[in-house]
Each structure stands twice: as structure tokens, then as C-alpha cells.
Image (cartoon, rainbow, N blue to C red):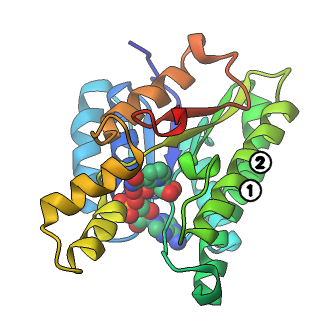
């Protein structure tokens, strides 16, 4: 098992869903954890503390709204001040909005670009100098299958996630001769609040909720099963391990076969 004792991981959007699953895996592996995200973080902090008690790690939460570069800068300063910097940066925070291009609300486009794409640029540019000076680092961007293919109604999300994969390649190249790596993970459907809302929207048209969930999977994900946050957490641990050290600039699918079609 990968030991990350002494390393500090910052996971954006870790009060829910995938980010929370990844934070729990990193804490189990002994990393100090900086949580981020909206909502009541106390339950999540307690959950991570319980794991950290066993491994001796430390946990904190920073409430930065990652759509604001100044708040991201404040979060990275907090990490430097309280934890000695960020060794593992998981850019996970993200939102979705579904509408056709001509009906897409301009302010939703702007916030998806800010949260799903620009935040990755800001947290990366601000964390990289510390990683370079310590001689080790991992930047892991939670992109999506929608970083590689499109789906109707998801113009902003698909554009932002394609951008994340492009940015990942450039950072992967710019760090290629160092012990810092940068990669993207591309999940298919994961049953989190972000996806539950899409199932609820289908069910609101009168379809049985179980049927709505089945239809959502059947349209895109050949396994007909959701990817789980713990599975994503294990992939993050692999990318943090020595065995993962030559994976650079990759966009790694974990999607029940979605992109094989
Ligand atoms: P979620 O809604 O369960 O969690 C999103 C997290 O981001 C929450 O903690 C929320 O508080 C936080 N967040 C939202 N806006 C923020 C902001 N402005 N500043 C700080 N934090 C903010 O969603 P999820 O499904 O766990 O998605 C996490 C990531 O995984 C997203 O980037 C999403 O695009 C990606 N993803 C999800 C799926 C899926 O099927 N669920 C598939 C592929 C990729």
C-alpha cells in the first residue's frame, strides 16, 4: 500500500462526492488533508480525522470559492503557512448545467469555465513552485469522459473538461524532467449529487426513478454500473506512488467502457 505519510494533499471540492472519496483514500494512506468545498465541512473533517488518528496525519479545511483566483491564492498561502505547502494537488471541484447552446445562460457558462477550468490553472500555477523546490509533487485533475467526447446539452462542461486535459498535457510536459507529475482522470458516471440531479430531472418527466437511473447508464456506460469514489481514490493513490511516476500528461479513463465505443 502507498504510504503518503508526511505529504500534504489539497483536494478541491472535497465536502461531497468524488472529492470526498479521494480525500478519504489519501487520508487512509497517511497524507495530511486540506479539504475544500461548500456546505457543512464538520462531518467530513470528523471522518478524515478518524482515519488520520490511525496514521498520524493532520486535517484542515479552507472554504475558498475556487471561482475566485484571490481565494485560491489565500488557500495556497494557508497550505504553506499551516502545512508547509501542497505536495498533492487534486483539482476536483466542478459543477454542471444542462441546456442547448442557444439557450445556455451566459452566467452559467462563465461560472463553469471559472470553476471547472480556470481554477485548475490558478491552483496549479500557485502550487507548482513549492513542489519544484521540494523536488516532488503530484497534480491530479479530475476531468471527465467529457474531456474527450461531447454530449448534447453540456457545451460549457465539455469545453471546460477538454480544456483541463489540454492544460494537463502542457503541465505534464513542463514538469517532465522533474519528480512532479501532472495527469487527468476521466471518470464516466459516478453516482454523486451532481449526477443524482440529472437522474431526478429525468424522473421529473414521469419515468420511474430506477428506470431513469438505468436509462442514464445504458445510454453511455456499457458496464451498466457506476464508477465509485473509492475506485477513483485508489487510482489517485496509484498516480501518487513510485509505480505511477512515469505517467505524465495522461488522460486516464475509468468509465465502465464509455470511451471504448
Ligand atoms: P458533487 O456535486 O458531489 O461535488 C462537488 C464538490 O465541489 C462539492 O464539494 C462542492 O462544494 C464543490 N464546489 C462546487 N463549486 C465550488 C466552488 N466554486 N468552490 C469550491 N468548491 C466548490 O460533484 P461530483 O460528482 O463529486 O464531481 C466532482 C468532480 O468530478 C467534478 O469536477 C466533476 O466534473 C467530475 N466528474 C464527475 C462525474 C460524475 O459522474 N459524478 C463524472 C466525471 C467527472
Q: Is mark 2 within 8 Å of ligand 1?
A: no
In the image, residue 43 above or below residue 144: below
Badge 1 vs badge 2, beta-carbon distance below 8 Å: yes
Position of residue 114 in the picture relative to residue 33 (left or right): right
Is 72 in front, or is 58? 72
To which quarter of the image does residue 36 belong?
A: bottom left
In the image, residue 108 above or below residue 246: below
Pointer 2 residue: 167
- Determine the residue positioned at 38% across, 24% down: 29
Is 255 in front, or is 64? 255
Which quarter is ligand 1 in?
Answer: bottom left
Q: Position of residue 214 (x, y in %)?
A: 23, 52
Q: CA distance from mark 1 to mark 2?
A: 8 Å
- Determine the residue positioned at 27% across, 56% down: 215
Is 191 in front, or is 104? 104
> Which numbered disc, 1 or 2, marks the residue closer to the eye?
2
**Mark found first going from the N terminus, 1 or 2:** 1
- Could you classify mark 2 by the number of other residues whose Cα lies within 10 Å: few (under 14), some (14-19), or many (20 or more)? many
Q: Position of residue 147 (x, y in %)?
A: 63, 50
To which quarter of the image does residue 117 belong?
A: bottom right
Q: Secondary structure at mark 1?
A: helix
Pointer 1 residue: 121
- Determine the residue positioned at 32% across, 71% down: 39
In the image, residue 206 above or below residue 210: below
Residue 172 appears anywhere in the view: yes
Q: Secondary structure at mark 2?
A: helix
Q: Position of residue 231 (x, y in %)?
A: 35, 31
Res. 193 mark: none
- Could you classify mark 1 by the number of other residues whose Cα lies within 10 Å: few (under 14), some (14-19), or many (20 or more)? some
In the image, residue 104 above or below residue 250: below
Amino acid at each position: 500500500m502507498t504510504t503518503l505519510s508526511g505529504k500534504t494533499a489539497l483536494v478541491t471540492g472535497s465536502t461531497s462526492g468524488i472529492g470526498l472519496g479521494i480525500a478519504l483514500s489519501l487520508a487512509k494512506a497517511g497524507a495530511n488533508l486540506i479539504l475544500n468545498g461548500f456546505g457543512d465541512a464538520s462531518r467530513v473533517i470528523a471522518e478524515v480525522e478518524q482515519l488520520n488518528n490511525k496514521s498520524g496525519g493532520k486535517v484542515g479545511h479552507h472554504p475558498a470559492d475556487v471561482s475566485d483566483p484571490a481565494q485560491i491564492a489565500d488557500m495556497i498561502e494557508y497550505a504553506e503557512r499551516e502545512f508547509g505547502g501542497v505536495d498533492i494537488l487534486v483539482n476536483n471541484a466542478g459543477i454542471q448545467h444542462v441546456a442547448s447552446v442557444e439557450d445556455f445562460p451566459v452566467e452559467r457558462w462563465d461560472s463553469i469555465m471559472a470553476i471547472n477550468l480556470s481554477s485548475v490553472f490558478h491552483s496549479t500555477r500557485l502550487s507548482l513552485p513549492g513542489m519544484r523546490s521540494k523536488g516532488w509533487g503530484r497534480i491530479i485533475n479530475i476531468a471527465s469522459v467529457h474531456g474527450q467526447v461531447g454530449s448534447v446539452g453540456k457545451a460549457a462542461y465539455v469545453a471546460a473538461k477538454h480544456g483541463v486535459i489540454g492544460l494537463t498535457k502542457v503541465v505534464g510536459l513542463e514538469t517532465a524532467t522533474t519528480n512532479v507529475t501532472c495527469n487527468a482522470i476521466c471518470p464516466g458516471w459516478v453516482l454523486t449529487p451532481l449526477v443524482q440531479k440529472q437522474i431526478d430531472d429525468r424522473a421529473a418527466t414521469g419515468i420511474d426513478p430506477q428506470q431513469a437511473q438505468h436509462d442514464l447508464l445504458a445510454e453511455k456506460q456499457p458496464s451498466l454500473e457506476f464508477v465509485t469514489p473509492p475506485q477513483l481514490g485508489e487510482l489517485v493513490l496509484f498516480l501518487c506512488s513510485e509505480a505511477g511516476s512515469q505517467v505524465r500528461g495522461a488522460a486516464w479513463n475509468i468509465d465502465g467502457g464509455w470511451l471504448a465505443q
